[in-house]
Amino acid sequence: MESRIIEIQDRASIRVYEGGSGPDLFFLHGAGGLLQNDPFLNALMENYRVTAPLLPGYEDSESEHLRDMLDFTLHSFDVLDQLNLNKPLVVGHSMGGMIAAEMAAIAPDAIERLALICPAGFWSDDHPIPDLFALLPYELPGLMFHDPEKNGDLMSAGGDFNDPEFLTEFLVGNAKRMGSAGKILFPIPDRGLSERAYRIKAKTEILWGAQDKLIVPHYASLFSSAIANSNLTMIQEAGHMLPYEQTSQVLEVIAKL
């Protein structure tokens, strides 16, 4: 997997990860960003030509122009245009799923195939989503993974949160990431997507971890009901980090698009 910086007029400087061969796939990451040597992207690259841009605030991607949901959505279209990607398969995880769904709602004819993996973007008072911005680093694996003992180290790239030097580095990077994500997720991730989702025409696969503790499966049925041309797949023994806990099953579903 290689990466490079692309310039979007005078509005943004964005790092893009690329690799693989096959049909174009455009991947939008969640609030945590991409993992080191991201295993899910590596798996996708076996069958697709994957393009995965990092939002401003993640690694060395920068922009001062993203303020609200519309800005994030249009920014993603700007990246598509800059890279000359014409109607790729769009895959989004968590916050990235929220942005991907917004893209398909705002420009229904521009997005033809869509995979939403545990997407954010809806809100139910009866099933409030935990506040990511109030959590300490060591609390994240238990919330994000079905099996945190097996997979929790993915979030820290094997680092030790008890190591003061590593913890400081993680907290600084996480503050930048959460500063960007907070513009559309804080205090709640409701920016009106539920009112626009009816506009989505794309053939859509919705995937959810049956043991998701962050965005509980109640939201899976809300998304499925809101998007007409959609199919919902619940995957067992997986939490919010579904693409990393059950990679092969996720790939099987995406292959239907």
Image: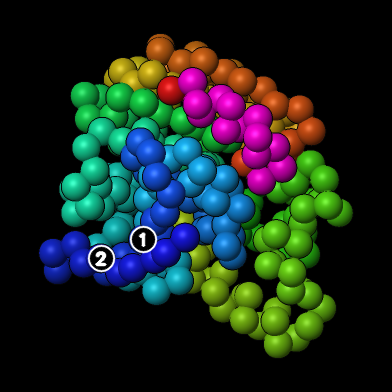
Q: Position of residue 83 (x, y in %)?
A: 22, 52
Q: Nearer the viewer, residue 127 or 141?
A: 141
Residue 168 versus residue 183 in the image, above or below: below
Quadrant of the rendered structure where residue 218 is?
Answer: top right
Q: Label 1 to label 2, Cα distance in Å?
A: 7 Å
Q: Is residue 245 magenta?
A: yes
Q: Residue at x 66, y 83 (%)?
A: 168
Q: Nearer the viewer, residue 110 or 124?
A: 110
Q: Identify which residue is drawn at 57% across, 62% down.
A: 37
Q: Position of residue 235 (x, y in %)?
A: 70, 26
Q: Secondary structure at mark 1?
A: strand
What range is drawn magenta here? 244-256
Q: Give the image quarter of residue 86.
A: top left
Q: Which mark is residue 16?
A: 1
Magenta residues: mostly which secondary structure? helix
Asked whether 15 falls inside the magenta stretch, the response is no
Amino acid, disc 2 = Ile
Secondary structure of residue under mark 2: strand
Please name the amino acid that badge 1 sits on. Val
- For residue 38, which quarter of the picture? bottom right
Q: Residue at x 53, y 58 (%)?
A: 34
Q: Are marks 1 and 2 in contact (CB under 8 Å)?
A: yes
Quickly name the residue at label 2: 6
Q: Earlier in the sequence, mark 1 or mark 2?
A: 2
